[in-house]
Amino acid sequence: MEKVVIIGTGCAGLTAALYTARANLNPLVLTGCMPGGLLTTTSIVENFPGFPEGIDGYEMMTRMQKQAERFGARIQFSTLESVDTSKYPFILTIDGEKVEAETVIIASGAGHRHLGLGSEHLLEKKGVTYCATCDGALPMFRNQPVVVVGGGDSACEEAMYLTRFASVVYLVHRRDSLRASKVMAARALTHKKIQPIWNTVVTDILDVKQDKVTGIRLKSLETGAESQIDCTGVFVAIGHVPNTQVFKGIITMDEDGYIIPTKGSSTNVPGIFVAGDCSDRVYRQAITAAGMGCAAAIDAERYLAAMNQ
Ligand code: NAP
């Protein structure tokens, strides 16, 4: 039987792993389908305290994992399929195997939000992507026009990264100002390769018949005018959706799937705790996720201590 099972290996999960490992709880930590979480797809993290020069997202997560493993965390490349909370210890089904757990820390993070266009789905990996650091250097984007959709920090970061390869980066945003932090917005808007297209939405991605991206159709939200631009890539950076599907109907969540903690990191099920982006629609930073992971670990440790008194 496991004392602690942690779902997710982003900043929240790995910090929870570090703290529970140091409390001698020997945590089992499930990676899910994206080991290291979304931060592994970031180029440089400049706002995590302690790294004055910034640090590559992948490197940061690798270091966090090593640190947790050093104290006994067991990282397992597997996915949680279901949770049975009708019994205690809880029964988790992990890649077909039943595992008993006294406590669970949900740190399953969030995935990329999609535009919801049929052509977006059909052209995924054929020019439509959700990660510039993963795909930006591909030959099909070199010296070609590309499009980034969104107005947040992610969109600015993606656009900046793509300026290394693309001939021009169109930044398509549905409003007339960016949501991104001031420093990121200023960087993007002053870059000579980045051309913002304001008050505009993407209505279609071309060309499904050719089985590759050749352009996009746009609609102005101000005038209703429709237009088309040529590009070989569409980088969608319009936010995230929490990875909480497996807990639906068991753990209390809001209408968008963000888990709602009851007190501290506790959920509606005693012994199940939550941390990071899957329960945070406000801050969503690496450092806040890490802090929440720490809190969840301490809460789980105290819960176990109280149960075993
Ligand atoms: P975000 O801040 O939620 O921004 C999403 C953007 O996409 C918004 O501009 C939004 O428009 C737009 N959008 C949402 N749905 C859309 C749709 N269906 N069609 C068109 N546009 C749509 O998400 P994010 O940029 O991924 O950032 C998430 C969090 O991570 C933030 O807290 C951010 O600060 C953080 N982050 C930080 C860094 C960094 O500091 N290095 C890098 C990346 C992310 P509206 O503005 O109109 O709502």
Image (cartoon, grey):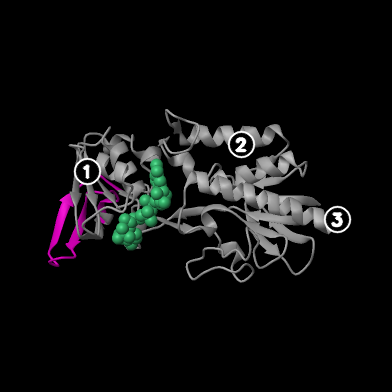
**Bounds of the magenta segment:** 209-234
Looking at the picture, how far across and down is residue 184, in whole percent?
31, 42
Residue shown at 68%/35% (left/top)?
69
Is 211 magenta? The answer is yes
Are the residues tagged 1 and 2 within 8 Å (C-beta)?
no
Looking at the picture, how far across and down is residue 19, in whole percent?
68, 42
Q: Amino acid at mark 3?
A: Asn
Q: Which residue is mark 3?
A: 308
Q: Is residue 170 above or below residue 143?
A: below
Packing grade of label 3 (10 A; few <14, some 14-19, many >=20) is few
Residue shown at 18%/62% (left/top)?
219
Q: Which residue is mark 1?
A: 189
Q: Is residue 265 left or right of residue 115?
A: right
- Is the shortest distance between ligand 1 and the CB of mark 3 under 8 Å? no
Helix, strand or loop under label 3: loop
**Quarter occupied by the C terminus:** bottom right
Query: Foreground residue, 130 or 158?
Result: 158
Q: Which residue is mark 2?
A: 65
Q: Amino acid at mark 1?
A: Leu
Marks 3/2: CA distance? 29 Å
